[in-house]
Amino acid sequence: MLLFPGVPHEHQLTIAAETKSKQSINQLPKRLRARAVYSRLDQGRLKHIKDPWLLYSSHRKVNPGEIMASKCLRGNVQESITRIRKAFMAGVNSVQPHELIRKHLQRNAESLEINKVNYTLKNNVYVIGFGKAVIGMIRPVEEALRNSDGTSHIQEGVISVPIGIQDTFAKKPHLLPSENSIIEIVEGAKNNIPDEAAYAGARKILSLAQKLKGNDLLLVLISGGGSALLPYPTPPLTLREKSELVKSLSKKGATITELNTVRKALSQTKGGKLASATEAEVVTLILSDIIGSPLDMIASGPTVCNTDPVDAAENILHKYDIAITENLKHILDKNALEKIKTNPNVSNCIIGSNETALSEVLSSITKTESDGQSVILSSSLSGEAGHIGRKMADFAANILEILCGNKALQISESDLCDLCINDSKASLMDALERCRKSKTPIWLIFGGETTVEVKGSGRGGRNQEMVLAFSMSVEEKLQGSTSTGEVVFLSGGTDGIDGPTDAAGAVTYWSSFNSGVKSQLKEAKEQGLNPEDFLRNNDSYTYFSELSSGQYLLQPGHTGTNVMDLQILLINPFN
């Protein structure tokens, strides 16, 4: 009989599955071994043993039947999905803007310390901002600049934020400005698309910056989504023309870097033009949503000097077969001849990024998982979402075979390259070796941002599309395999919004034990869903909404932050 830590010897438990008898696990029929494990307490009361690792805490050698029971509990996919969701949310919570601002902004009497630099306060502070996470930055900025008598060094401010965000956070006052705030809030850019409301906000922001003098301090708050919330097309180009242009590029698969290059070339505020429009000292606090956090690309770099080649935007338009109209040609030619003045008193500070979230995901897993290994493999995952999903499935299947001893410990350079794994190969191989020897799980963590080439008319986003493609491919790759274990994969946007949907992403699973294979794909087909049709139509949101009443969608709502996407891959070998 197993001995559990902390349980008196006279109350040691007899393990049984579903039955209430004292027979041992290895005497039960196989169909019952894969069910819940129960323990008999004194007076016949039954209590569910939720922690599968208790089964390994024996004071004697466990028999094969008990090991099987332990493996069954390890194969509880729903528990694994819950754990992987929690790890994702730990990453999201680590990049909450109000906490990041407090870490980087410190009031010292009549000066403000930002990134170890002190700025003199003389009732001379102005605040502007744009982005999905900016509204959460305002309250801590106001608190730092408020005096003991209730007055403030902030004289005026304007921020441009997503439409509806104040209502979204109505029950989260810590994410909203103070009740007596003098910061004007302009909402716009519905579905992350520049509109007239955002354009009006951009005009107010530029107007405020232009009137400031050299002894003023302009705090600029930027986060992901800032490009759509600061639209100011260079005349004679209209907002509609510019929006249609960017939309066409996005549909054809242009990267975020390419999109921002074009935006900078066609804007009155981006590419350093906002900073050049003011005489004030400028300090920009940035929550990055770009791979590698290049300052000139985040929100299209409104306070960073544009170093793009003069023909960069035009080359991108040619690459994606975008017609160059007369208005476009006029602006591009003008940019080639015009030299924009620069503001020498500009400081840009990254306060949070995808790497920040990845580190917290790793820390969360390390704290909560009693064994196994966890590794951050990439913070630069990019490419077409469906393609990456398939490559991720290939990668997962190969690793499960390795951990189960059915393949040699070897990962090809092409597999690493496909998933943008550049500097972490040694850590991956070391973790795989340890997990293969101990038959314990491995957690692999990725971050970045992919794109979707839209060919259908469905509704979805890059994360949901990636998970759907993974689900289909991992089933195919492991068909007929003798390896047993579970594979769980999650991909989600840290802003809580994946494409024009109310989901951040999705999670999927594949599991194999003696009783056979269980998978999300099989679950879908049992419900009459054809995943191939949904993927072909870029309709991943509809697919996950209809599958098992939407239980595999990630739906945290607007999170108040944005540092791109997180992917978490859990591979747990059983044999």
Image (spheres, helix red, strand yellow):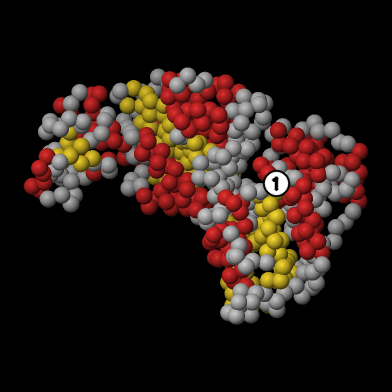
Give the quarter of the image for residue 211: bottom right
Q: Number of marks in the image?
A: 1
Does residue 110 appear to the left or right of 277 in the view shown? left
Q: In the rendering, at what x and y percent does residue 14 appear?
A: 14, 38
Amino acid type at circle 1 is: Ala
Q: Is residue 482 above or below residue 496?
A: above
Which residue is drawn at the image coordinates 11% and 44% (left, top)? 42
Quarter where residue 43 is shown: top left
Determine if residue 60 is in view: no
In depth, the one of 211 and 488 nearer the eye is: 211
With 98 as the anchor, is 7 left or right in this view?
A: left
Label 1: few (<14), some (14–19) or many (≥20) C-alpha neighbours in 10 Å: many
Q: Report the residue at 54% width, 41% height from top.
A: 504
- Pinpoint residue 502: horizontal percent, then vertical percent: 56, 40
Classify the position of the C terminus by image quarter.
Answer: top left
In the picture provided, is 489 more to the left or to the right than 518?
right
259 over 484 or under it: above or below: below
Report which residue position mark 1 lands on.
189
Residue at (48%, 43%) from the top-left corner?
A: 445
SS assignment at label 1: loop
Q: Residue furthest left?
A: 10
